[in-house]
Image (cartoon, helix red, strand yellow):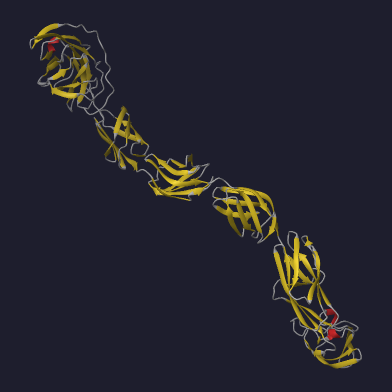
Amino acid sequence: MKSNYSLLTRIPNACVLLFILFCSYHNAHAQTVSAYDIDSGSEPIFPLNQQKIYGIAMSSIGGDATLTDLTTQATSGTYVGSDVSSFSLYYNNINDFGSATFLTFSSSTSLGAGEIISFTGFSQTIVGDGVDRYFFIAANINGGATLGNTISFPFFSLSNFNFSTSVSFTSSLGPSGTKTIQAIAAPTISSFSPGSAGSGNTVTITGTGFIGVTAVSFGGTAATSFNVVSSTTITAIVSTGTSGSISVTAAGGTATSPGFTFLLPPTISSINPTAAGTGATVTITGTNLLGTTDVLFGASAAASFTVVSSTTITAVVANGSTGAVTVKSPAGGASIAGFSFLLPPTVVVFNPTSAAQGGSVTIDGTNFVNVTSVSFGGVPAESFVVVSSKTITAKVGVGASGSVSVTTSGGTASQPNFVFLDPKPLVKIGSSTTGTLVTNSSSTVIDLGKTTLTKDLTREFIIENSGSSNLTILNVASSNSKISLVTAPSTLIPAEIGQLIFKLDAKDPGVFSSLIEISFVGALYQFELKGEVLGENPELEIFNIVTPNGDGAHDFLKLANIEAYPANTVSIFNRWGDKVYSISQYNNSESGKRFEGVSNEGEQRALNDGTYFYVIELGSRKISGFLQLSR
């Protein structure tokens, strides 16, 4: 008997005890055996070929009693000899046919209803402690039995029970035990849940024909144990297991169902990063991660997780706690130590509250651990240094006004009201925004022109603020004291211009140059100024080729050192002697004070190419000659 059934219902009946005095080994004592029926005759089928019919409870008082044979007669029923091959007798200390021990077959050949059924050749002791022991009679049904035929045992008489010693025997047996011959269909499996499980997990198997179940296996490996809940349900505990089919062996045969996956317990080999805060994603690497049901950071469940493959999980940290990262699945759990939950940072204050690109800002707060970025107005800092968990120094990048933000593995913190200074100074020659732009470069040279001794030369420039924030001028430096600053603005609002004037000291003759550096908050502007102080009565050098085509070479009549003679007059005549140009205080720096191939006598017009004659008056001294005009 290899299956478990619920205990048979005990139906106690009143017993009348008869006592017989007997002697054994020269000692006299009373011994009584009581028997009563425990069977209603409606027991479930055991295996297909063993259908239980009747159950008897016996107890002995006053000494052990040994039952050696039992005879009865199936005096009613419709079965025939071809239905039953024989009858069997079983014994158990408890009221359970399923786990009872086989004692013997009936000695008679089955002939059908009315036959004498005798059980002999066995010896079963009933301990004399007054506790019930149990005997069961089962019919061994032939494969071709007629379904629906019945087998019925009547009340037993006292002569049917033989003991190896004289006892007082009392029975209360009835009603008759009756069994209808039944057929058992082959079992089927319609579903099982869960479809994957590990060692020690319980799987519920649903189907039909779960009668007389003797084995359940997973992928060919026997279940640790199983419980037949009903003829349609079994619960089984997975052993070491193998992936494959689930198999159920019952009285009617064996049923299988494919698709079971045996889950090996998970392992974790690494986590990355090892420190993270709320909302951060951590990658967990290991083995056997399919079927994961839970991921924990410390003692806190992950906000969410994705099983990427059998070796990878990505999990989002919730509130979390420091400790081990744990993965759970139906097959078991695995943990790895070393995870640190990072509290989100805070930004308390930053200084200064405004800065330009490249400016340094000190940020104070808390939890500056695993800092991944610092930004100003949403624009990443040019660089940053984590001084401590409470202090960061950062250089402003291209920047924008807005919040100062610090992002760590634990989250992001911000503090508003940072002002990005956007200095975009432009230096132009002249007194208005239409002046010529001075290129910001130390190699840019601006010619101040020439002057004579004791007559200082000044040149006017403007600074234009083309940026979107206030422009603060910190310093204007000159590398040569001969060229000095006369005036400069201090602060310009966006689109405002300010006057910038430099002076060339004319105390000494010579050519002088100076590197000018204008320092702004967040910007530096550089260019070179060059000028010449002429000595007394310098020789006039005349460049008599004029090609006014805008190529920057010989676009005007250049009279070198004319600045030494400010009271000059220059006149130009055509070959017929007509005056076509005349100007006083001629100089090489101003377009309106120099000859550029255009007549200023009468109708102003571009002169034709050809040869012209000049007369230069330097006080009492006159210089004359010719020039060649060619466009």
Q: Residue 319 vs residue 265: left or right?
A: right
Image quadrant of residue 381? bottom right
Name the side, left or right, on which 516 lies relative to 125: right
**Viewer-closest of 49 and 304:** 304
Question: Horizontal placement of 351 versus 182: left or right?
Answer: right
- Inspect this view and state whether residue 490 appears: yes
Placement of 507 over or under 628, stated as above or below: above
Which is nearer the eye, 487 or 161?
487
538 left or right of 239?
A: right
Depicted 305 relative to depicted 148: above or below: below
Q: Tell me where residue 43 appears, x and y as whole percent.
A: 25, 20
Residue at the left extreme, as displayed:
26
Instruction: Give the residue displayed 91% in from the left and 89% down from the top.
Output: 619
Whether residue 82 is visible = no
Locate the C terminus and report the quarter of the image it occupies.
bottom right
Residue 580 position within the rendered picture, expressed as x and y whole percent measured from the top left? 88, 87
Vertical relation: 208 (above or below) 602? above
Where does the image place residue 329, in percent across and percent down from the top left?
Answer: 40, 40
Residue 56, position as x, y percentages in the image: 20, 16
Q: Nearer the viewer, residue 265 or 175?
A: 265
Quadrant in the picture for the N terminus: top left
Please tell me whether residue 183 is drawn above or below residue 430 in the rendered image. above
Numbered circles on residues, count: 0
